């Protein structure tokens, strides 16, 4: 009987490829959602809203927020890894590059395809960089810390994402059908990709 689950590759080059390939794909996914104009994921609504108010690029704001979020790791006793620092820096850089390079779609069908590709890209990217085993992203680390404290990760994540979504909307970040698609699809898609890229 054949095993359809890919074994974890532990060599350093393979792990680095997963890490940085995942971060690049994550930035692409953010760019696709932003350029669709149909709505971003909760954190990116927040990043976009702050960027608009501050007169910065969205990627720059992703880096700043990621660095600030890491301060919350101190009371949660979380330790950053190479992947954590790389996440803080490179997702924002890749997101800015994607937003700059991607053409803005003028047809609803193309906008919808941007949303679909964006959500799939972010789900796969998440599994890739986490499966590299080099440290969670700054926002993921909060969830890990809450788990260590015995709190409900599902509840904690919901509260945090609803909060940043509401704040981003008030700051003029783009909320729309794409936001709903992201919320409904990101979990199942991420779980699906773990079949090929196990997280443990």
Image: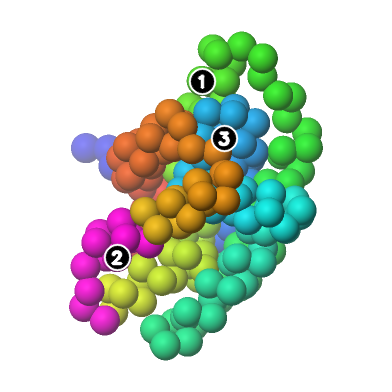
Q: CA distance from mark 3 to mark 2?
A: 25 Å
112 relative to 3, above or below: above
Under circle 2, the secondary element is helix
Look at the image and give the residue range highlighted in magenta. 149-160
Q: Earlier in the sequence, mark 3 or mark 2?
A: 3
Residue 23 appears in the rendering: no
Q: Which residue is mark 1?
A: 112
Q: What sort of colour scheme is used for the picture?
A: rainbow
Q: Which residue is mark 3?
A: 33
The residue shown at (53%, 20%) is: 113
Under circle 3, the secondary element is helix
Name the dominant secondary structure of the magenta segment: helix
Label at residue 156: 2
Q: Residues within 10 Å of mark 3 (few under 14, many from 20)?
A: many
**x and y percentages locating residue 193 in the rendered image:** 38, 42
Q: CA distance from mark 1 to mark 2?
A: 30 Å
On the rendered image, what quadrant is the N terminus found in? top left
- The residue lying toward the viewer, choosing from 162 and 97, is 162
The residue shown at (47%, 79%) is: 72
Query: Is residue 109 shown in magenta?
Result: no
The residue shown at (70%, 24%) is: 104
* Residue ranking furthest to the front: 170
Q: Earlier in the sequence, mark 1 or mark 2?
A: 1
40 relative to 159, above or below: above
- Within the image, what quadrant is residue 149 found in? bottom left
């Amino acid at each position: 009987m054949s095993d359809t689950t890919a074994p974890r590759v532990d060599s350093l080059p393979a792990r680095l490829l997963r890490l940085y390939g995942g971060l690049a794909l994550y930035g692409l996914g953010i760019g696709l959602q932003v350029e669709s104009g149909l709505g971003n994921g909760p954190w990116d609504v927040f990043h976009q809203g702050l960027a608009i108010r501050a007169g910065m690029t969205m990627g720059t704001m992703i880096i700043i927020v990621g660095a600030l979020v890491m301060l919350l790791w101190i009371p949660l006793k979380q330790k950053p890894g190479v992947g954590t620092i790389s996440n803080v820096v490179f997702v924002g850089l890749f997101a800015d590059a994607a937003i700059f390079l991607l053409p803005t779609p003028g047809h609803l069908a193309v906008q919808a395809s941007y949303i679909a590709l964006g959500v799939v890209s972010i789900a796969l990217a998440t599994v890739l960089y986490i499966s590299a085993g080099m440290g969670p992203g700054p926002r993921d680390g909060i969830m890990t810390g809450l788990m260590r404290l015995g709190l409900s990760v599902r509840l904690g994540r919901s509260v945090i994402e609803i909060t940043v979504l509401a704040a981003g909307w008030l700051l003029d970040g783009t909320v729309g059908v794409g936001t709903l698609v992201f919320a409904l699809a990101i979990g199942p898609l991420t779980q699906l990709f773990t079949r090929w890229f196990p997280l443990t």
